[in-house]
Image (cartoon, helix red, strand yellow):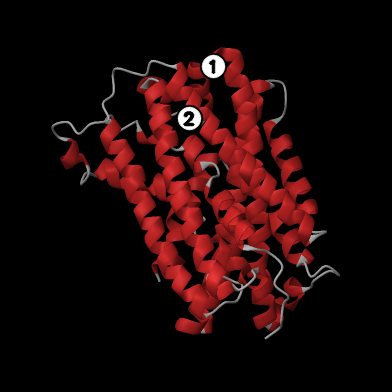
């Protein structure tokens, strides 16, 4: 096994988990959930259930990560637990689905939010440019990548907390929705709409295992890897519940229904049309941290496959800074191909089922 010098601390590992999780899902999926669910209590219960599932996953992966502290995520774990062939399949899923598709979805959403502020711009062009620029950041220097990731993640958390605080303090709130349980709400928890909406919620929570993909680069991974997973997941669960409460509290359900840019709609009700545009631009900026975190973590799976499988040896090539440059280039090429050939809905459908397979094992 190759030896690597640990280079990042608990703070950065937690930031990667948080940034991987807080991507497109929380700013886009609520609009699809309210099409069939009209109860505020049930909608928040939906996000609570998703958060508990993610915490269970983080506990399991934390135990595995402490026992087998090596980069690669499911590729490494399933290869050792079951069989290398199963690990290979899981690694290939991570390469083609687990990271490239979520990056493309985040870039699409970022372009969509940016186009709300500047209607004349090409949203796909902006999305492609950001993907390329972030790849260039991560291909050069690991320390600069750490600073870049920590700053963007901190700003994203500050943005979400500011949006929520303003929503609670500056608006009177909707009177057409109740957050207390009403007759029939508990039956909805066992309904088909609740189950199908949970698919969108689990997509929004995906990324809770992000630190396992970079275990080699974490200081004292046996101790810090489980901490990063639990700290990041618990913090995001709290932010998701608060954010969705504010979205439902400030914007009417009929305006949110079926809409992608629910954050922009809520911000418009909080700050007015011009303030909503500014907030949409900030949300678009905040999505860059998710793109950055996945650009960092994903190529480490490809690199691990290259170290284990001779046919993919080219993927494991590192530059002088110890960064898997070829893996980053391959992933970025896949992202750009998806950006220009798929729709947002198609990407989410592609992701939602496939991402659960390796975690289920």
Res 88 seen here: no
Relative to 122, is 67 above or below?
below
The percent position of residue 222, horizontal first and vertical second, equals 54, 75
Mark 1 and mark 2 residues within 8 Å of each other at the beta carbon: no
Query: Which residue does the numbered mark 1 point to in the structure image?
Result: 271
The percent position of residue 336, horizontal first and vertical second, equals 70, 48
Q: From the image, which quarter does the C terminus lie in?
A: bottom left
The residue most toward the bottom is 1
Relative to 208, is 212 above or below?
below
Query: Which residue does the numbered mark 2 point to in the structure image?
Result: 164
Relative to 87, is 39 above or below?
above
The percent position of residue 56, horizontal first and vertical second, equals 37, 62
**Among numbered discs 1 and 2, the one appearing first in the sequence:** 2
The residue most toward the left is 183
Q: Relative to residue 80, is residue 255 drawn left or right?
A: left
Q: For the point 19% across and 36% down, which residue is it?
A: 185
């Amino acid at each position: 096994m190759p030896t690597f010098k640990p280079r990042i601390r608990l703070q950065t590992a937690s930031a990667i988990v948080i940034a991987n999780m807080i991507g497109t899902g929380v700013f886009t999926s609520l609009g699809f959930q309210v099409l069939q669910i009209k109860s505020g209590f049930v909608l928040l219960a939906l996000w609570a259930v998703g958060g508990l599932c993610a915490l269970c996953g983080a506990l399991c992966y934390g135990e595995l990560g402490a026992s087998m502290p090596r980069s690669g995520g499911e590729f490494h774990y399933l290869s050792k637990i079951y069989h290398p062939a199963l690990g290979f399949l899981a690694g290939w899923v991570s390469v083609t689905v687990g990271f490239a598709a979520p990056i493309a979805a985040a870039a699409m959403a970022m372009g969509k939010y940016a186009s709300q502020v500047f209607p004349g711009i090409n949203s796909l062009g902006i999305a492609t440019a950001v993907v390329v620029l972030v790849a260039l950041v991560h291909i050069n220097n690991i320390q600069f990548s750490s600073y870049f990731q920590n700053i963007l993640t901190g700003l994203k958390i500050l943005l979400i907390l500011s949006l929520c605080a303003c929503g609670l303090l500056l608006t009177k709130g909707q009177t057409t929705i109740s957050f207390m349980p009403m007759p029939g709400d508990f039956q909805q928890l066992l309904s088909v709409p609740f189950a199908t909406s949970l698919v969108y919620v689990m997509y929004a929570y995906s990324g809770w295992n992000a630190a396992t993909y970079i275990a080699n680069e974490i200081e004292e991974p046996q101790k810090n890897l489980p901490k990063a997973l639990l700290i990041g997941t618990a913090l995001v669960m709290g932010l998701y519940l608060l954010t969705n409460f504010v979205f439902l509290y400030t914007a009417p359900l009929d305006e949110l229904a079926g809409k992608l840019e629910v954050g922009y709609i809520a911000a418009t009700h909080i700050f007015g049309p011009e303030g909503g545009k500014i907030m949409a631009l900030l949300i678009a900026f905040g999505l860059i941290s998710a793109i950055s975190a996945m650009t960092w973590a994903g190529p480490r799976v490809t690199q691990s496959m290259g170290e284990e499988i001779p046919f993919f040896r080219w993927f494991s090539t590192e530059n002088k800074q110890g960064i898997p440059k070829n893996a980053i280039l391959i992933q970025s090429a896949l992202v750009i191909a998806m950006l220009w050939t798929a729709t947002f809905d198609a990407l989410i459908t592609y992701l939602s089922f496939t991402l659960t397979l390796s975690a289920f094992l």
